[in-house]
Amino acid sequence: MAKRVLAFDFGASSGRAMLGTYQDGIISMQEIHRFSNDPVSVRGTLYWDVLRLYHEILTGIQLAVQQGGFDALGIDTWGVDFGLLDNNGNLLSNPVHYRDERTVHAPKQVFEAVSQSEIYQRTGIQFMRINTLYQLQYLKKNDPELLDFASHLLMIPDLFAYFLTGEKRSEETIVSTSNLLSARGHKWDTDLMHRLGLPTDCLAPMIEPGEIYGTISEEICDKTGCGPVPVVAVCCHDTASAVVSVPSTEEDFAYISCGTWSLFGTELSAPIMTKEAEQANFTNEGGFDHTTRFLKNIMGLWVIQESRRQWQREGQTCGYDTLENEALEAEPFRCYIDMDAPEFELPGNLPKRIQEYCRKTGQFIPQTRGEIMRCIYQSLAMKYRYTFETLQRLTGKAFRHIHMIGGGIKDTLLCRMTADSCNTTVVSGPAEATAMGNIAVQLIALGELSSLNEARKTIINSISSTTYRPVQPKEWEEAYQAYLAVTERKDS
């Protein structure tokens, strides 16, 4: 008999509801609802519109009921952000978007109390000012009353699960992005929080992937027409769900989860928190069954997405296919950017910032859309190579190929450039990696799949993949040396 589960996958720019059906050893997926995820700026602060997103969840449930119903539900989202509840369980304020500039000075304040190195040794998390730790530091210093009123802190997927079930829990993989989870103990690092003067009585009990938050409340069942189905704690961090779906049965594999961010890493049985890993700013995030996602967060398709938004604001019509074709027509290897440079982090006129970066570094200054897009594509592929080499050095592993997963693999130009830049075979698929991983963990929770290994074997049988092999490795090798010269000069 077929099992059907409903997966909600929230990315930084859009969300979707996917019905997953498991029958005869195959997982099939049907998108039943897709919606934009638009942040809202109010009086200089950038917020997530979580109540609208919750409305989209209810809409997705109703649509799934109309499609024949489902046996369980799971939610994954982006990391680091959170909501605060008062004593009555009401949301105190809209969660603030991680790209908001409020945390710019927070890391320096934190490091005055606890050094950056010690925090890395405790949590294993890559330094990024957007992390929950620095957001809480900002509130402690600038809005302490909000923390005083907070009865519970819930990460975004845990917040949605609470809205549906009334149960307040903290799922491990999403908490691992906070910079507040003990990398070796799999629990909140309350000692670190006490030393920083951050509250700990608002922390909810931990829940692991594959466990159940609770059942959908009677009120919501009445509104949507669904039955009291369980809400599963999947790997609630979207990247953790995506990694579940990597179609590999090898013990050692490398992956790039491509989307607004590019997450480049591997799966390990234990964290790597050496001085070299800290200096390389690699992160150790939680995965299914207490595995470690040892990876690097790279500014990914955000730079393309935000550049396109700028051109649209200027009245230009430009779909992604058009931009890719214009990039192909532009002359290669004329200029590069460091994708992770701070000037590309915030929304705004990114094409202008790219031109300014190239001017400051003494390079050719791209003028046309195609030249700017070529610069972005090549720079991202070069960043992948740099990260690939670093990953192999830090782990002591040699990876035979790279799995590229997620929506970014629809951009075949990026896949081809990655194979050339890294001089290795790239295997792409699945595109809906996060939703597939979300569904797989729900099936494990329901007893339909026995383990992560069986889930991956099932996923291999359920998807198609595309293989890309290097075509111009020599040309890319020469260009890579020029890329290193530019980015190292900029970093210095």
Image (cartoon, rainbow, N blue to C red):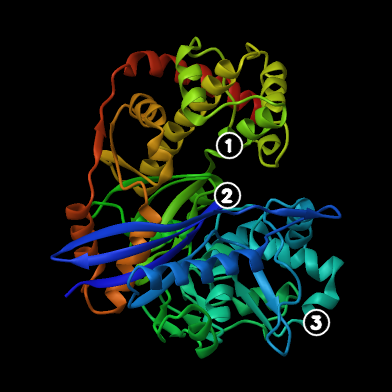
Q: Residue at x 56, y 60 (%)?
A: 79
The residue to which callout 3 is attached is 148
Q: In terms of sequence position, does the residue under pointer 3 or pointer 2 come before the other?
A: 2
Identified at 72% across, 27% down, the residue is: 314
In the image, residue 150 lies at what x, y percent?
Answer: 74, 81
Which mark is nearer the camera, 1 or 3?
Answer: 1
Q: Residues within 10 Å of mark 2 (few under 14, many from 20)?
A: some
Above-or-below relation of 255 to 422: below
Q: Residue 376 occupies which quadrant of the picture?
A: top right
The three-letter amino acid code for the residue at tag 3 is Asp
For residue 86, side relative to residue 472 (left or right)? right
Q: Residue 292, percent across and down? A: 40, 62
The disc placed on residue 13 is: 2
Q: Is residue 235 visible?
A: no
Determine contact: label 1, label 2, CB under 8 Å: yes
Report how far apart the C-alphas of labels 1 and 2 lie in the structure: 9 Å
Looking at this rendering, what residue extends furthest in the front direction? 66
Nearer the viewer's eye, disc 3 or disc 2?
Answer: 2
